[in-house]
Amino acid sequence: MFIVGEGFLIFCAVFLASSLFFLPTLGPIELFLVIWPKVLLVALVAQFSLYFNDLYEIRVSESTLDLATHLLQAVGMMSVALAVIYFLWPAAIIGRWVFFLSLVFLIALLVSWRFLYTLAIRRRMFTSKTLMVGAGELAADILKAVSQRKDLSYDILGILSHPEEKTVIAEDQGLPLRHGFENLCDLAELEEVSSIIVALDDKRGIMPYKELLNCKVRGLSVIDGESFYERITGRLLVEKINPGWLIFSDGFRKSSLTRFLKRLVDFVTAVVMLILFLPVMVIVAAAVKLDSPGPVVFSQERVGEEGRVFMIHKFRSMRKDAEEETGPVWAEKDDPRITRVGRVIRKLRIDELPQLLNILSGEMSFVGPRPERPYFVERLRRTAPYYNERFTVKPGLSGWAQVMYAYGASEEDALEKLKYDLYYIKNMSLVLDLVVIFHTVKIVLLGRGSR
């Protein structure tokens, strides 16, 4: 609602500025028919600029100074982008003075819209009241995730624990903590809640089936805690979930049509990108060769779909003897093994371009869990729960874990990324692939997260 509403306001701002200049000569309907494509172009470029300046991240909009800074950067980016478009396509020009007046209206509407949005969130105007059953580790994880999501549509009013449950949540955390599940539905109706989150670490012997069923038939929504955590974080809590939950939960659908369309998109896109980036790849190959001794392309074993080992290809960004003394190790921040050219191409992700050949051959996809080396796979299989489930899909050039989690170089980071990888596998779709690609483009253009 926020993004669509803001897009509508941007469109209105530009159309209003146009109307002040052109309405004396054109009627409102005729003006709209003539100018709407140009107005839509400005609106789309404006929203792309807002996105690339993190203005659709609620964490940024909480600070007035951050909001003003990022808003000015977005307006500057939009102006430059439109100047380039107008130079290449003069017919799209909306008018110099129209554009300047549009900026005035646009900034006024954006600031007002975001002020109202922040006010609505702080006053919880559109939230659904809920109670949480459970006060253990899962409940604590949920509360932590909720505290990081100011725009969440759930407002947890209180927590109910069982006397035999290992309580992790303290009473001084700001939420009422009640012991026992008696009269759960009466309490829910008294608090006017519409849903109950069941977040018990161990349901055996303490699960209040009778009370929850009574709440369900009274019209309250009963939400599984693990599913709720997945919904609000975009990852699976692998340390807490059991195989039964994975078996009976929604998701993990991989229809033949979805696989075919994914493969078709991968193949066609890889061919187009190879053609477009061929000049860049030739220049990079020459730079790598001149910068340090060794092969231009670095090939390495990785584990792919169904555990099959394949050779992944990259432009070499490290010394040719990078692991002769240490053996297999993860890349570190400011890794001394990286060459001068390697530091640039890693920053811009250009070193990954040869993997287009892996995508063409069907060993990889554009979106999927990043392929890991056999050495690390064997270690992680012993320590990370459900790690083998990563190999039920093709590995990707980018993935949900890569766009949602900062670069990591340890087994702890691998476990965190597994939570996002399993979420992607569970909810895999072409729409989610587009979301990942869109985020990846932003990360690459802004040079974030590389090592």
Image (cartoon, rainbow, N blue to C red):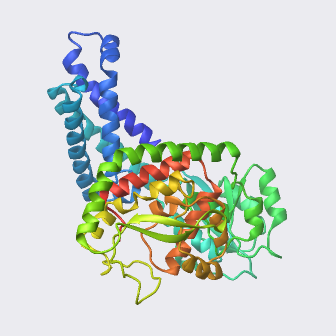
Please give the name of the residue rendered at 30% of the width and 63% of the height, measured from the top-left corner: 345
Residue 399 in sight here:
no
Farthest left residue in view: 97
Q: Is 329 situated above or below 276?
A: below
Q: Quadrant of the C terminus?
A: bottom left
Residue 355 lies, in percent from the top left, at 45, 58
Residue 224 lies, in percent from the top left, at 70, 62
Q: Is 110 situated above or below 18?
A: below
Please give the name of the residue rendered at 50% of the width and 63% of the height, measured from the top-left corner: 401
Residue 322 in sight here:
yes
Q: Nearer the viewer, residue 139 or 401?
A: 401
Q: Nearer the viewer, residue 405 or 202?
A: 405
Q: Is residue 133 left or right of residue 398?
A: right
Residue 151 lies, in percent from the top left, at 47, 54
Occupied quadrant, residue 295 = bottom left
Q: Is residue 357 left or right of residue 193?
A: left
Q: Is 368 situated above or below 31?
A: below
Q: Is 199 situated above or below 111?
A: below
Q: Is residue 49 left or right of residue 299?
A: left
Please give the name of the residue rendered at 40% of the width and 46% of the height, measured from the top-left corner: 273
Please give the name of the residue rendered at 58% of the width and 72% of the height, measured from the top-left corner: 141
